[in-house]
Image (cartoon, rainbow, N blue to C red):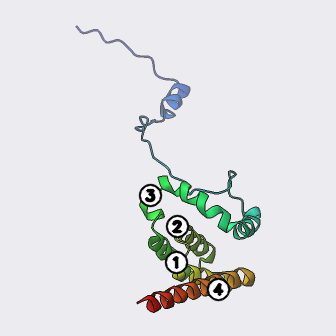
Amino acid sequence: ESIVEDKPEKTPEEVEEEEEIIYVPEPRQIHSAKLQFTPRIFPSPMRESKREEEEDWLLRNRRHLNKKQQKRLEGVDISERDPYWLKGKGDDFFQKADYASAINAYTCALEVDNALLAALSNRAACYLKIEKYDECILDCTSAIQILQEEKEAQVETAQRE
């Protein structure tokens, strides 16, 4: 003879509790990501409300900042120190009609090489597109001065030979 024990039947509450058990997956593996931020001249975060004010300040004080910017760029990736690469990025932004980003890229290129006429004239075109005519005139005037200085240097070299 076998002895069979009767198991008490489960109450509806017990059945409901068992159905409410939710599977929780194991925790994800930990990964680290290295983030690099674009260097800023100002110590505070960028704010859209102050953007135009900062740009105006930078335009007025550009010559003073060029030497300090060179020091800041020493630890930056080579692609951000190459004025032609930066000019190319500006061209890409210009083609997509993202003129503010193009101005930023051309400005960075000019901080590395302030005599890069292509970046200077392209930045002037950006200013023209966003109707910042005074900045456009400043860049065009700077480009003309650089061209005049190069022409004078070529004439002097030709006269020596």
Mark 2: which amino acid?
Val
How much space separates mark 1 and mark 2, taking CA atoms? Answer: 9 Å
How much space separates mark 4 and mark 3, taking CA atoms? Answer: 30 Å
Quarter location, residue 6: top left
Examine the rendered structure and indicate whether residue 63 appears above or below residue 70.
below
Q: Residue at x 67, y 63 (%)?
A: 64
- What secondary structure is found at the residue carrying circle 1? loop
Q: Is the residue under label 4 in contact with that under label 2 (CB below 8 Å)?
A: no
Q: Of the residues tagged 4 and 3, which is closer to the observer?
A: 4
Task: From the image, tell me which residue sits under label 4.
Answer: 140
- What secondary structure is found at the residue carrying circle 2? helix
Which label's residue is closer to the chain start, 1 or 4? 1
Examine the rendered structure and indicate whether residue 55 appears above or below residue 29.
below
Q: Quadrant of the N terminus?
A: top left
Q: Is the residue under label 3 in contact with that under label 2 (CB below 8 Å)?
A: no
Q: Quadrant of the C terminus?
A: bottom left
**Residue 77, numbered label:** 3
Mark 4: which amino acid?
Cys
Which label's residue is closer to the chain start, 3 or 1? 3
How much space separates mark 2 and mark 3, taking CA atoms? Answer: 13 Å
- What secondary structure is found at the residue carrying circle 3? loop
How much space separates mark 3 and mark 1, taking CA atoms? Answer: 20 Å
Q: Measured from the top left, where is residue 71 in percent x and y? A: 55, 55
Examine the rendered structure and indicate whether residue 96 appears above or below residue 69.
below
Q: In this view of the protein, can residue 5 be seen by the observer?
A: yes
Q: Measured from the top left, where is residue 33 in percent x and y? A: 45, 46
Task: From the image, tell me which residue sits under label 2.
Answer: 112
- Direction left: furthest residue: 1
